[in-house]
Amino acid sequence: KNQVEQSPQSLIILEGKNCTLQCNYTVSPFSNLRWYKQDTGRGPVSLTIMTFSENTKSNGRYTATLDADTKQSSLHITASQLSDSASYICVVSAGYSGGGADGLTFGKGTHLIIQP
Amino acid sequence: KAGVTQTPRYLIKTRGQQVTLSCSPISGHRSVSWYQQTPGQGLQFLFEYFSETQRNKGNFPGRFSGRQFSNSRSEMNVSTLELGDSALYLCASSLRTSGQETQYFGPGTRLLVL
C-alpha cells in the first residue's frame, strides 16, 4: 500500500531559525514528489516538485531534497519568518499509466509555528 | 488569471440533510479533483473529472457524488449527511489528468454537520 509519512507532526521554532521537515514514502512506481504549504483557512500551494533524477530544488528560502534510493525527502526552511507558520504537506505521485489524481498519496502534514 | 474559487466557504448542516458544493477551476483547466481534509486523516481523494467525465474515484461511499459541466465548473454533492462528514472540502484544478501536473487548490468549503 502506498504511504507517505511526515515528521514531526508539529514543530515550534523561533523567528530567524532554520528547520527541516521530513517525508518518507513507500509509493511505487515513483513519479514525482511535491511539497505544498497550506496556510490556515486556505488551500495548499505548491512549493516545489521533484522528479526521480533531481535531488535538490530551491524556491526562495525553501530547499527540498530527494533521496530516491532511501525514499526520503526533506524540506529545509532557512531564516524562518512569521509568515512561514503553516502546514507543510508532502505529496508523492505514482507513475503508473493513466495516473491521475487517484495516483497521488498525501502525507498528513507537519504543522509549523514560528514564534517571534 | 483568477484562481480556483469555491462556494460557499462555510456551511452548517444537520445530520440527514444533503449539501452541494461548487468549484470553478482556473480558466483553461479541464481537470477538477475533489478532496476531503480532516485533522486526523489529512487530504483524501474523492474523485476527479475531466471534460465532464469522472476519470478516477477514491474510496468514499456512494453518498458522495459529483459532476462537471461543459465550462469545467464542478459540483460535489453529499447526501444523508453524517457527523463524520464534517471536514474541509478542497477542489483543485489542473490542465490535464496526467498526475504530473501541478494542482492548484481553491480555498475550500468548511462543512460542519451537527
Image (spheres, coloured by chain):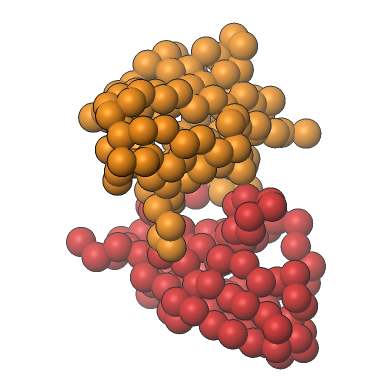
Chain colours: A orange, B red
- Of residues A63 and B104, the one nearer the viewer is A63
Residue A6 image point, x, y percent:
60, 32
Above or below, A105 relative to A62: below
Q: Residue at x 70, y 33 (%)?
A: A3
State the image coordinates of residue A62 (x, y, percent, origin top left). Answer: 32, 28
Q: How many marks?
A: 0
Q: Is residue B6 above or below residue A70?
A: below
At horizontal 20% and vertical 61% (from top left) the residue drawn is: B1
| B37 up-or-down from B68: above or below | above
Q: Position of residue A103 (x, y in %)?
A: 62, 41
* Residue located farthest toward the front when viewing the structure as drawn: A116
Q: Is residue B89 visible?
A: yes
Task: Return the residue nearer the eye: A68 or A60.
Answer: A60
Q: Is residue B101 visible?
A: no
The x and y percentages for residue B21 are 53, 79
User: Left or right: B4 with respect to B11?
Assistant: left
Residue shown at the point (45%, 23%) measured from the top left: A20
Q: Quadrant of residue A26?
A: top right
Check the picture and name the quadrant holding the C terminus of chain B. bottom right
Residue B101, by quadrant, is top left
User: Which residue is pictured at 35% across the width and 23% down the height?
Assistant: A18
Q: Residue furthest left?
A: B1
Residue farthest along the top direction in this orientation: A69
- Answer with left or right where residue B50 lies relative to residue B113: left
Viewer-nearest residue: B64 or A62 = A62
Give B113 or A45, whichever is nearer the viewer: B113
